[in-house]
Each structure stands twice: as C-alpha cells, then as structure tokens.
Image (cartoon, rainbow, N blue to C red):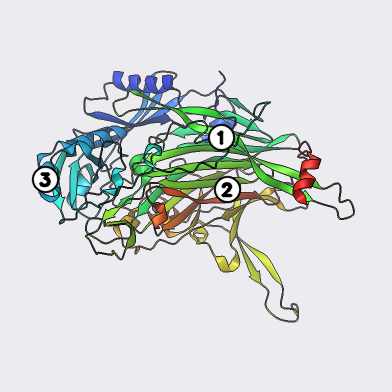
C-alpha cells in the first residue's frame, strides 16, 4: 500500500520501535512506554517529496529511577537514533497506571479502614477509583515524585452509575512509581447521596416510543476516496494522523481550485486542554485536569460504533498504539469519516422566474473521534464544506464530576443536581494549533477589527464603518483576546499570491463561543496553563513547539509553552506562521446535565476570504429535483 510520510505508525511499525528499543538495552523491567508515535519528517523533507525513511518517537519512563527519556528509532534501519534523559518532568499518565492505581487504592488497608469508618463499607468491590492528576501546588513531593490524587466513588451494584455516589471525605494520594498509596487524606464525613442516577438503556424506565427510523442511504457509496490515510473529497484532500497524545490530527489540507491543489493548512491539532474547577472546598480544590498532556487524548480514544456514533456510509480508521509495557494496543474504528447533508448551501429565486428556484444542498465531510477521560467525554469533529469552510467542533458530554453535600447544605460554588449531590462550577479550556500553509509557506496574520468612522463631514449620516486590519509583526503584538465591540476576527494571508481583485489571498479565522479564565493569574493551575492568558497567539513555526502548555504539563511547575515561547517576541510577518487558538467553555452545571450531559458544543470556523475568486461552490449541481413534493411542502 502506498504510504504518505505523515501517516501514523502501523501496528507493525509500533512493534518494530518497541523491539528496537528493547534490543538496545534501554528498557528495564520498570520502564514504561508512555507513547510510541510517528516522528514526523521535517517540513523541508516533506516538501522535497523524496521517499523518506520512517521514524518513531517514543517517550519512556523508568519508575525505578523516576526518569523520563525521549527516544527516536529509525524504523527502516532498525536503530535507535536518539536517546535523551529529560530531567525533572513527569510524562503523561498511562492507561496501565490508571488500572494499577485503582488496584493499589483498593488494596490499601488504610483506605479500607477509612471507608469502613466513614461509610460502613467493608467490601471494596463496588468502589471506583479514578486516577486524577496531582498537579503542582508548591510542595516538594509534587516536584520529586510521580503522583496521582484519585477521586473515589461507590456503585450501588456492579454496573450502575457510580459517579453519583462520590466518596467525598476520602482522598488517597498515590505514588505511581511504587504504585503504593502514600497516604489517605480524610476531610470529614459526608453521607453517600441517597438517590441513584442512571442513564444506561436497561435502567431507564418508560423510554419514548415515537421515534421512527431515519435511514441515511448512499446507494452509490460515499463521494470520498481513501488511500491509506490520504483522503480526497470533492475538491478537498488531506491526510489523517493519530497519536497517543493529541489523538486525531489533520495534515496537508488542500483545496483543488481550477485544476490546482492549493495548500491551506500544513497541520491542525488539539494541543492541550485544562479543566479548572472553581470550588475552594478542601475536597474539590485540587481538581484541574490537563487532558491532553496528563491523560493522552489519543490513548483515551473510543472504538466507534456504526449507527450510534456515526450514521451513514462510514469509513473507519484504526489507531495503533501500545500499552505501557510495549504490548500492541489497537483501537478499532478510532476515527470515523462520513458525509452529512447540511441543509442549504445556497439558494436564490428570481422573482420573475418563480418556477426556477436555484438551490443547492450543502454536504460536509466529517472526520471525528471521541475520547473518554474517566467521567467526561470529548468528541472532536473536523468538518470540511464545499464552499471552502473548515470547521472544528468539540462536543462535551459524559458524566459531571460530582461532589456530595450534607443534608440541608447548598454549596455556593456549584449547582445542586440531586439530593445531597452537587456539580462544582468549572471551565474547559482547549487549545488548537493551526499551522497554516496558505498557497505556500510564507504567510502573514492580520487582526481585523470593525470600527465605526468618526462622525464628521465625511460621515454625515453617522452610519459608516469599516474593517481595520492590523498586520501582526511580532509575537507579543499578536497576543490578543476576542473583542465583541469590534466583531474581531483574524485573517491569514499570503502577500505573495494575489487574487482576482489584486488582494493577497486569505482565510479568515472566526472564533466561536469563548470565555476568560476566572481563576486568578496566580492560581497554581494557571501558572501551568499560560496558554489561557490570551485567546489568540501567533508564533513563527518551530519544530519543537507543539503543545500549548509545553511538552510535560503533568505536575509541571509552570512557565512552559506558548507564554514562554512568545516572550521571545519573534517576528511573525511573511513567514511560516502558526496560529494558536484558546477557547473556553464556562460550565455552570444544570440539573439537566444529570445523570448524563446532553452534548455542549464549542469550536471555530475558517472561512476563505479572498482565497478564491468567487464562491467556489458555484459549480455544485442541483440535486435530483422532486418538484411535486417540493411544491406541496412549500404551500
Ligand atoms: Co463541563
């Protein structure tokens, strides 16, 4: 099978990487494979088009020595080409550690004693222990050990929803290197909330019966073609990537215009996210999860199900990872691709030709994956449209992280959602990295503010406004928040390529919903998440700058990532630029988010803005008309 140099590692390549590292003597019985992923070739190599050797990049962690190593393997030659100790960092927690951490807590006599004392629970079989990152709060142990601060819950029976019964008063602290409970912190007594809160199909009585089948059929198959991980659809072409950390990534996104593939994005990825909780209660105050850098969005990816996660003619891609001991880990159907009807693409009825309305259906290509990070689900959806739009949408669903209250208590920093059960306020901040390549490498970003003209003799009707574009020359100048007063957007342009009206070709960046962080800049989590300080950042492309909170946010002491890099204030005009977007969802929970949350949506849109000479979807043909039906529904 022909392979694109940006295709993720195959199962065989993961196995080779693991074996080469084993044979090199670098792996001890206490070494964990944190991640094994494609080492992407340099941009210059990709653009050269030559057949490239395949490389893997593996992060290793030795529990015995509390040391992290970055390694690279030439898969073609079977050699280790890089091996570097990275001091004082904690890489992503692995799935194996999630499982082992749970067992360590359940087997801990001190935990069992606390459980018995506070709740009268003597059997830990129904107890759930979710690994939660320890973060960093200025203590020596957080700096020198590999830690987790799990949250615990207890089910009523082996399959009910245990998250509605938080064990509020008990907080074990686990040494993940020794895989032993360091201590069990006790904060007082809270009874278990009295009610069950279930959502599973076999537990919800009286399900509605008035839903008729809705079938999506594509009798001639889908309109896209797939060659390995290379996809072509309508005028679009791109490569789908996947890795343990970021999950799904998109590469080499191009649009065929007048017979020519025009590049738009070199790489698009979710680089980090953080979920800070706004509750200062002792049992809740340490909750903040960096789901990409601490848990691994790809590692937590679901195996998607036809007819449930995805509807229609689906093409799935598997993900090939390995567990922390290097055993192959395949996630079947990790990525789903399909087409969706998306209403009207465009329409006009000429009043004088009422029998000939021109209307086109909009079709979009959906490339999606869903990750489960303990209680929460995140769906990641890229949409490509026929008119050149590119949309990214995150779907937030799953189970709220809940706390118990004592009878009669109403917590001020959350919402009561069931008797003695509340959901603390929190925010979800995401960061996406958009490495533009608009008709070539050298691009320039403009911040566009729409401003009213001064009221003077040139503006006698006081109605004038115009778009004022500020060219972003340096990184510090580029740091910015959204601004509703000026309907602020951003525009990526290529000043060297002009469109039909003589302007630089461009793509507009339209932000969607967003939030400001509510915690103080001095809050511990914010020191580690400098990327929330601004919504938009622009950097010159640099090979090592991929993750907004730095390479190792787990237990980081802060100061790494976007904030640090952009302090250099490098020039960014007319160069290979990367636009980083931070967007936050402020979640004040509702009773309706219980027992399972209806999906919340957040994202952004990229829209051609002078990239094409006219509506690129002008050539979409009409659908097979069903005139009689159409008329009857319009009267
Ligand atoms: Co939420």
Q: Which mark is residue 575?
A: 2
Mark 3, other Cα within 10 Å: few <14 / some 14–19 / many ≥20: some
Q: Can the viewer see residue 396? A: yes
Residue plotted at (32% across, 28% down): 323
Position of 290 relative to 468 (above/below):
above
Disc 1 element: loop
Q: Position of residue 474 (x, y in %)?
A: 52, 57
Q: CA distance from mark 3 to mark 2?
A: 63 Å
Q: Do labels 1 and 2 touch, CB within 8 Å? A: no
Q: Secondary structure at mark 3?
A: helix
Relative to 42, 470 lies left or right: right
Q: Nearer the viewer, residue 182 or 204?
A: 204
Query: Upstream in the sequence, badge 1 or badge 3?
Result: 3
Crowd tier of the residue under label 1, counting other residues whose Cα lies within 10 Å: few below 14, some 14–19, many 20 or above? some
Q: Is residue 63 above or below residue 483?
A: above
N-terminal of the two: label 3 or label 2? Answer: 3
Disc number lying in front (3 or 2)? 3
Q: Which residue is mark 3?
A: 116
Q: Residue at x 24, y 58 (%)?
A: 405
Looking at the rendered structure, which numbered label has been put on residue 311?
1
Q: Is residue 576 visible from the viewing direction of this image?
A: no
Q: Residue at x 39, y 47 (%)?
A: 596
In the image: residue 160, left or right of residue 502 = left
Q: Return the mark for residue 105.
A: none
Which badge, 1 or 2, comes first in the chain's sequence?
1
Mark 2 burial class by Cα count in 10 Å: few <14, some 14-19, many 20+: some
The reply to whether dot 3 and dot 2 touch (C-beta < 8 Å) is: no
Label 1 and label 3: CA atoms lie apart by 47 Å
Q: Where residue 25 sits: x, y (%)? A: 26, 21
In the image, 207 versus 279, the foreground residue is: 207
Residue at (77%, 42%) from the top-left corner? 629
């Amino acid at each position: 099978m022909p392979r694109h140099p940006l295709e993720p590692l195959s199962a065989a390549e993961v196995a080779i990487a693991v074996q080469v590292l084993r044979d090199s003597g670098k792996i001890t019985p206490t070494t964990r494979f944190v991640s094994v992923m494609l080492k992407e070739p340099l941009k210059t190599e990709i653009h050269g088009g030559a057949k490239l050797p395949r490389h893997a990049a593996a992060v290793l962690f030795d529990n015995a020595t509390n040391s992290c190593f970055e390694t690279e393997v030439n898969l073609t030659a079977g050699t280790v080409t890089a091996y570097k100790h990275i001091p004082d960092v904690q890489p992503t927690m692995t799935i194996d550690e999630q499982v082992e951490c749970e067992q360590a807590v359940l087997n801990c006599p001190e935990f069992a004693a606390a459980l018995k004392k506070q709740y009268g629970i003597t059997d830990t079989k129904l107890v759930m222990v979710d690994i939660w990152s320890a973060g960093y709060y200025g203590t020596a142990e957080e700096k020198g050990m590999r830690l987790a601060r799990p949250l615990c819950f207890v089910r009523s029976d082996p399959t009910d929803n245990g998250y509605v019964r938080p064990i509020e008063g008990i907080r074990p602290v686990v040494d993940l290197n020794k895989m032993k409970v360091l201590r069990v912190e006790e904060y007082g007594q809270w009874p278990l909330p009295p009610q069950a809160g279930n959502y599973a199909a076999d537990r919800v009585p009286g399900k509605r019966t008035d839903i008729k089948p809705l079938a999506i059929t594509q009798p001639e198959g889908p309109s896209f073609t797939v060659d390995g991980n290379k996809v072509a659809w309508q005028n679009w072409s791109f490569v789908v990537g996947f890795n343990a950390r970021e999950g799904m990534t998109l590469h080499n996104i191009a649009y065929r215009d007048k017979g020519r593939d025009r590049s738009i994005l070199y790489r698009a990825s979710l680089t980090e996210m953080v979920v800070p909780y706004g509750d200062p209660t002792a049992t809740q105050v340490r909750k903040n999860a960096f789901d990409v850098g601490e848990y691994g969005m790809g590692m937590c990816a679901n195996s998607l199900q036809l007819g449930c996660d995805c509807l229609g003619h689906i093409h799935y891609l598997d993900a090939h990872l390995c567990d922390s001991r290097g055993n192959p880990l395949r996630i079947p159907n990790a990525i789903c691709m399909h087409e969706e009807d998306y209403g009207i693409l465009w329409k006009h009825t000429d009043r004088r030709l009422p029998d000939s309305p021109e209307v086109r259906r909009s079709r979009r290509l959906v490339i999606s994956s869903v990750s489960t990070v303990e209680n929460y689900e995140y769906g990641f959806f890229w949409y490509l449209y026929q008119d050149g739009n590119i949309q990214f949408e995150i779907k937030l669903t799953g189970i709220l992280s809940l706390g118990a209250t004592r009878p009669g208590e109403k917590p001020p920093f959350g919402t009561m959602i069931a008797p003695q059960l509340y959901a603390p306020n929190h925010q979800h901040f995401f960061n996406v990295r958009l490495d533009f390549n608009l008709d070539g490498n050298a691009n320039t970003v403009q911040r566009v503010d729409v401003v009213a003209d001064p009221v003077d003799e040139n503006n006698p009707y006081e109605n004038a406004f115009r778009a004022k574009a500020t060219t972003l020359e340096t990184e510090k100048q580029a740091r910015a928040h959204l601004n509703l007063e000026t309907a602020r957007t951003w525009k990526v342009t290529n000043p060297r390529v002009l469109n039909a009206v003589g302007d630089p070709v461009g793509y507009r960046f339209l932000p969607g919903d967003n939030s400001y962080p509510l915690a103080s800049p001095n809050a511990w989590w914010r020191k580690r998440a400098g990327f929330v300080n601004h919504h938009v950042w622009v950097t010159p492309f640099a090979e090592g700058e991929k993750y907004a909170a730095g390479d190792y946010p787990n237990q980081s002491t802060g100061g790494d990532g976007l904030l640090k890099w952009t302090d250099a204030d490098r020039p960014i005009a007319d160069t290979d630029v990367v636009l980083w977007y931070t967007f936050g969802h402020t979640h004040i929970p509702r009773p309706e988010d219980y027992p399972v949350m209806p999906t919340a949506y957040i994202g952004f849109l990229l829209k051609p803005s002078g990239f094409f000479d006219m509506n690129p979807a002008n050539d979409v043909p009409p659908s097979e008309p069903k005139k009689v039906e159409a008329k009857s529904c319009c009267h």
